[in-house]
Image: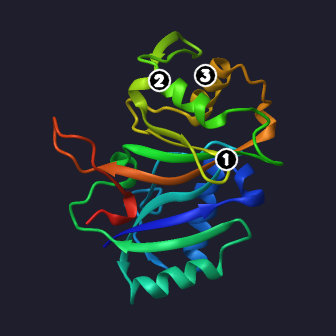
Amino acid sequence: MKIRIKFAKYGVMKFIGHLDTMRFFQKAVRRANIDVKYSEGFSPHQIMSFAAPLGVGMESYGEYMDIEVNSMDSIENMKEALNQVMVDGMEILSVTLLPERAKNAMASVSAASYRIRMKEGGFPVCGLKASIEGFYRQETIPYTKETKKSVLELDLKQGIYELDADDEGGIQMLVNASSSGNIKPSMVFEKLCQFAGWEISPSAYQVTRLETYTNLAGEGEPHRFVPLSEVK
């Protein structure tokens, strides 16, 4: 059976990297006595995959991982058993039984929503909403991404589906999170600050992933994003 687990990662655990998060859940599954399925061969390992990795320092309430199990009594009991072995900053939000032919979490990711807020107080700027609207109305938002091997010229506008100020004085966005066109929220915020003339230190704000989505629309159809936990 294929199981999709949605979890939150916050507080001190936001400083734990992706590989350590994987190791944490491998141990948690054993401690919770989950009848997880193992691969075959000389070095068997738990059949487990994660959706889009979360950057160090970011919080999230929309993280996902898939596991395969040989048996279970109920998804409610699995959720309770896992939460009993979680640490502060890790919380299991839901457990879902997937259809047999469902794609794994990593292959399903199409988009993700984020919130950016100041760690102390509100944004030290005037006209937050007007600046965001002016920034988003641009036909193109060029961004230069430097890697170890090359320099890439991107148009962020193609991967920003929604961008607005929220009611709590923060910034929310829905962006491309697929493997072929992943847009990091820090990239969008960097260009927004340049556009609006803001000087905000990266250490002054907190980025939180709110949800991770898959796209159920067919080819040529408008995007139809749904949370990974709602895939049937």
Image quadrant containing the N terminus = bottom left
Outermost residue to the right: 120
First along the sequence among labels 1 and 3: 1
Q: Secondary structure at mark 1?
A: loop
Disc 2: CA contacts within 10 A as few (<14), some (14-19) or many (>=20): many
Query: Callout 3, which amino acid?
Result: Lys
Nearest the eye: 119 or 106: 119
- Give the labeled residue for mark 1: 58
Q: Report the side of 98 relative to 191 (left or right).
A: left
Type of amino acid under label 2:
Leu
Q: Determine which residue is flagged by label 2.
A: 156
For the point 30% across and 62% down, the residue is: 231
> Where is residue 19 drawn, in percent x and y?
61, 48
Q: Would residue 133 appear left or right of 230 to someone viewing this image? A: right
What residue do we see at 78% from left, 24% from top?
A: 199
Task: Write down the residue under mark 3.
Answer: 191
Secondary element at tag 3:
helix
Q: Nearer the viewer, mark 1 or mark 3?
A: 3
Q: Amino acid at mark 1?
A: Met
Say if 95 sits above or below 51 in the image: below
Crowd rating for badge 3 (residues with CA inside 10 Å; few <14, some 14–19, many 20+): some
Q: Nearer the viewer, residue 229 or 103?
A: 229
Q: CA distance from mark 1 to mark 2?
A: 20 Å
Q: Position of residue 186 (x, y in %)?
A: 62, 32
